[in-house]
């Protein structure tokens, strides 16, 4: 086991809960600090849960000194209720986490973004994701690892109307997505999480973007 410490933001989310489980099982970190809004059901000797108010993150006392930041923060337009509320979570909170952790010595940032992320996109969702990637990239982490899944598949704690139908339809459509279009295929949240932990094990320097195909290959290595 290394002496590294990690922060995981969004540990109760679809990707985050898998990421937490794999991080704890991997032994890559001496301690994993989960930033949470409420207590998680999981307990582990190497897990520390800290209740976080992202509005006050930059003024947080005794911010953990860690090396790796796993950012699985994200919401949906429907859940957020407005563009401003969506941007607050998917841009402001993400960038605030990156800025604060960078000042505290973190050198590798693992960000769950989305396929099509582009700061110049006409699509609001894709534009916000792209702006977040760009802002984090300007901070100068030794390693920035951006994971861009398309439609995420997995068991959520909250059931969404029509989601089962959407997953089945996405799986059927994915058969036709080949070549360059393969990046739009639905992907299991567990696969994304496994890929993140594999990259955390290797910690390559520089900025790297991982498509669905790359994540599926990486996941087999864990």
Image: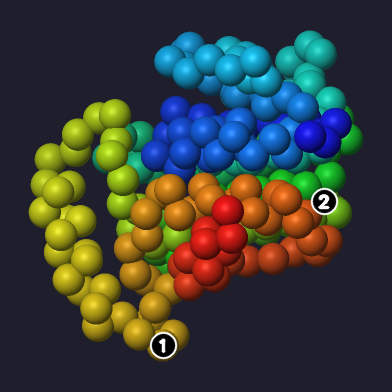
Q: What is the quadrant of residue 51 in the picture?
A: top right
Mark found first going from the N terminus, 1 or 2: 2
Q: Residue at x 48, y 18 (%)?
A: 42
Instruction: Classify residue 61 as left or right of residue 133.
Output: right
Image label count: 2
Task: Say if residue 117 shows up in the picture.
Answer: no
Instruction: Classify residue 218 as left or right of residue 181.
Output: right
Q: What is the quadrant of residue 104 in the picture?
A: top right
User: In what element is the residue under mark 2?
Assistant: loop
User: In what element is the residue under mark 1?
Assistant: helix
Q: Label 2: few (<14), some or many (≥20) within 10 Å?
A: some
Asked whether the residues under the numbered discs 1 and 2 touch, taking CB atoms below 8 Å apart as contact, a structural biologist would say no
Q: CA distance from mark 1 to mark 2?
A: 32 Å
Which is closer to the viewer, label 1 or label 2? 1
Q: Quadrant of the N terminus?
A: top right
Q: Label 1: few (<14), some or many (≥20) within 10 Å?
A: few
**Along the line of sight, which residue is nearer the eye, 164 or 125?**
164
Q: What is the quadrant of residue 80 in the picture?
A: top left
Instruction: Please give the residue where the numbered disc 2 appears in the rendered image.
Output: 141
Instruction: Please give the residue where the numbered disc 1 appears in the rendered image.
Output: 179
């Amino acid at each position: 086991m290394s002496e590294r410490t990690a922060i995981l933001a969004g540990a109760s989310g679809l990707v985050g809960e898998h990421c937490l489980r794999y991080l704890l099982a991997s032994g890559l970190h001496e301690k994993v600090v989960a930033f949470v809004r409420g207590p998680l059901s999981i307990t582990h000797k190497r897990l520390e849960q800290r209740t976080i108010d992202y509005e006050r993150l930059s003024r947080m006392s005794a911010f953990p000194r860690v090396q790796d930041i796993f950012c699985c923060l994200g919401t949906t337009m429907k859940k957020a209720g407005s563009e401003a509320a969506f941007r607050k979570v998917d841009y402001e909170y993400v960038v605030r986490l990156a800025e604060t952790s960078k000042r505290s010595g973190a050198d590798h940032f693992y960000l769950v973004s989305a396929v099509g992320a582009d700061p110049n996109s006409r699509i609001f969702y894709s534009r916000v994701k792209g702006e977040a990637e760009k802002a984090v990239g300007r901070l100068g982490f030794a390693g920035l690892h951006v994971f861009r899944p398309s439609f995420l598949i997995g068991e959520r704690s909250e059931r969404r109307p029509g989601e089962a139908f959407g997953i089945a339809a996405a799986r059927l459509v994915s058969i036709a997505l080949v070549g360059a279009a393969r990046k739009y295929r639905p992907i299991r949240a567990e696969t994304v999480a496994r890929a993140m932990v594999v990259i955390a094990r290797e910690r390559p320097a520089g900025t790297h973007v991982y498509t669905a195909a790359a994540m599926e290959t990486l996941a087999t290595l864990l």
